[in-house]
Amino acid sequence: MRKKIDMIFTAEASFARVVALGVIVNKPLSIWHSIIPGMFIFDFLKRTKAIKEYSKHFLFPRKLALDGVQDIMKGEDEKNTLLRIDEEINAWLNALKRYSPKLHHELMEVVKLLMDHYSKLLCSEGSSHDLLINNAYKNRDDYKVFLEQLNSVEKEVDRALTEISGETENLRERLLEEQTQVEKQRKKSIDDIFPA
């Protein structure tokens, strides 16, 4: 079980890095890159920071979901597990000064959806993350339905975040770029795991 959990979390962390890099790479280089020697060092540091920041927020609900599924599989009451997760989301949002009932609710929906997904993966067999998904979902269409549900709930998280942060052009563009990269990478994963 520990090996599967590690495979799942490693795959999620890798996905977050690929999405963050995809967003960064799509931004055009500034004129400063050609004028200032060594600008690539600053660019590298900026990219590293952006990847860490995106990964931290992307992985938070995934870690909660994985921990929750493990606790339930070890015999903890599901209601108590969900209550603990709810409290952790509340504390996290308050620490970020981003609490709103809607954002809290939507993050909880993401966690519940991921818990169901991870539960399927942990109950399937496979020596890689892709094989766990293949054996858990059996076909392209069922996996695609899950990813579409996840995309939909994550967009609601973004909407709630926009509402409390104030809708700026910069935030709207960043969230759209992230959504585009997430959907692109998820489509690629469907094709990789269930070739047509």
Image: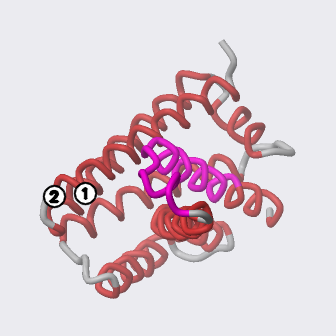
Q: Which residue is mark 2?
A: 168
Labelled pair 2, 1 in contact (Cβ < 8 Å)? yes
Mark 1 crowdedness (10 Å alpha carbons): few <14, some 14-19, many ≥20: some
Q: Quadrant of the N terminus?
A: bottom right
How much space separates mark 2 and mark 1, taking CA atoms? Answer: 5 Å
Q: Which label belongs to residue 189? A: none
Report the magenta residues as a range: 11-36
Q: Which residue is located at x 45 percent, y 51 percent?
A: 113
> Looking at the rendering, which quadrant does residue 183 occupy?
top left
Q: Residue drawn 26% across and 64% down?
A: 105
- Callout 2 crowding tier (Cα within 10 Å): few <14, some 14–19, many ≥20: few
- Residue 27 sits inside the magenta stretch: yes
Most common secondary structure along the magenta stretch: helix
Identify the residue shown where x is 46% and y is 30%: 145
The relative height of residue 42 versus residue 157 in the rendered view (above or below) is below
Q: Is residue 194 left or right of residue 37?
A: right
Q: Is residue 99 magenta?
A: no
Under mark 2, the amino acid is Thr
Q: Quadrant of residue 188?
A: top right
Q: Find residue 152 and report its horizontal and vertical position in percent.
A: 33, 41
Q: Residue furthest top?
A: 196
70 over 118 or under it: above or below: below
Q: Locate the C terminus and report the quarter of the image it occupies.
A: top right
Q: Is residue 87 above or below residue 165?
A: below
Colour scheme employed for the rendering of this structure: secondary structure
- Mark 1 highlights which residue? 171
Do we see residue 62 in this rendering? no
- Residue 126 position within the rendered picture, expressed as x and y whole percent measured from the top left: 83, 42
- Would residue 187 be visible to someone looking at this image? yes
Residue drawn at the location 68% of the way across and 38% of the way down: 133
- Residue 63: where, in percent of width, then height? 57, 68
Local secondary structure at mark 1: helix
